[in-house]
Amino acid sequence: MDMCGFYLGTTNSPIFNYNAAGVKIRLTSAIQSAFAGRNNRFFAQTHESGAAQGWREITTTAVSDITLKLDVNYTDGSESWANIEAMKPVTFKYKNDETGHLRRGFVAQDLEKIDAQYIKRVNGAVNEDGSLREILTLDTNPLLMDALTVITLLMEKDKIRDKQLSDLNEAIKLLS
């Protein structure tokens, strides 16, 4: 029988022949979670109805492997352009920042209206009565993807304008 606690070893490790240290949390024999890490890699696994689900690597980087995607369609980037164009930058101070540093950024509620993918809802605040309160955080992956798309579109426009400018300069030379 699996027990709660800390463990080290290759038994049920996230990667074959990979020594990892971790912890197993058990609510019942049917409901468990395990977390393991080593060498800047971190993994999670759940057990449902006594069956271990596959280990999943937790990452803070954008996962973009084609083998993990369905219905891949290339677009012209116009939706990303419109989304970025609709964003309204703000300056602000955090309520709990005693130094009162002026910061720059965006308001999550504003970005959610533009594209719901831009935000995540988390229990990240505590009310005065001790209860958890949901707050909105930015999901940097879709924001980064839209920003990169707009940069790509701007580069394409720049190439077209460079060609137009070159053509105009040649026409001016011919008129001289």
Image (cartoon, grey):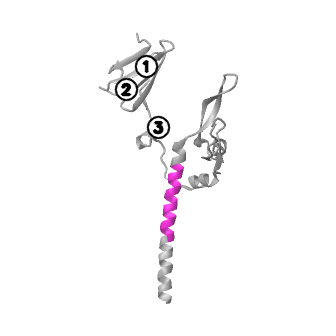
- First in sequence: mark 2 vs mark 3: 2
- First in sequence: mark 3 vs mark 1: 1
Reply yes or no: does residue 76 show up in magenta. Answer: no
For residue 94, say whether it is visible. yes
In front: label 1 or label 2: 1
- First in sequence: mark 1 vs mark 2: 2
Q: Position of residue 16 (x, y in %)?
A: 31, 26
Q: Around disc 2, counting alpha carbons within 10 Å, would you say few (fewer than 14), some (14 to 19), or many (20 or more)?
A: many
Q: Is residue 29 left or right of residue 21?
A: right
Instruction: Please name the amino acid that badge 2 sits on.
Output: Pro
Q: Mark 3 = which residue?
A: 60
Q: Tell me the quadrant of the picture where the N terminus can be found.
A: top left
Q: Mark 1 = which residue?
A: 23
Q: Mark 2 = which residue?
A: 14
- Stretch in magenta: 145-161
| CB within 8 Å, label 3 to label 1 | no
